[in-house]
Image: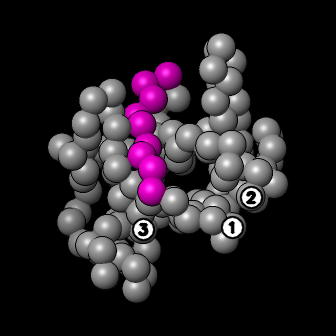
Amino acid sequence: MKCCDEALHYIRSDKSRMTGKITYQFSAKIWQYSGPAAWYFISLPPDISEEIRHHLGWKEEGWGRLKATAKIGSTEWKTAIWFDTKHNAYILPLKADIRKKEKLEVDMEIEATVWV
């Protein structure tokens, strides 16, 4: 992959310039983990996940965790994304208060922004 702005998938925004973080905007379908905790997630698209892992993988903490800020609708929060080897993508957990504020349900296709 050549190293220049046009080759990267991110979108520069005022927030990115202020924080030094890379902005990713994408659509994703909400899914629920089938285990006992029943967490809700969205998966970042494979191409975005690959790009993040390639350029920022060195910043991962335990279990492939990367600190992030996310925004869905008008709700923005500090969180983390985790690399899930089963999906070969980063996943973003959606806490109950976020789902309630934005009226989110399983199988909904939503627009999300993540700053890493």
The residue most toward the front is 97
**Could you tell me if the residues under marks 1 and 2 are in contact, i.e. CB atoms within 8 Å?**
yes
Q: Residue at x 72, y 49 (%)?
A: 99
Give the residue at mark 1.
73
| Amino acid at dot 1 | Gly
Please provide percent x and percent y for residue 24: 47, 63
Q: Residue at x 66, y 35 (%)?
A: 40
| Amino acid at dot 2 | Lys
Q: Point out the frontmost of discs 1 and 2.
A: 2
Q: Point out the frontmost of discs 2 and 3.
A: 2
Please provide percent x and percent y for residue 5: 30, 74
Lower sequence index among marks 1 and 2: 1
Quadrant (top left/top right/bottom left/bottom right) for the N terminus: bottom left
Q: Residue at x 69, y 67 (%)?
A: 73
* Range covered by the magenta-colored residues: 78-86
Can residue 7 be seen from the camera position used here? no
Give the residue at mark 3.
23
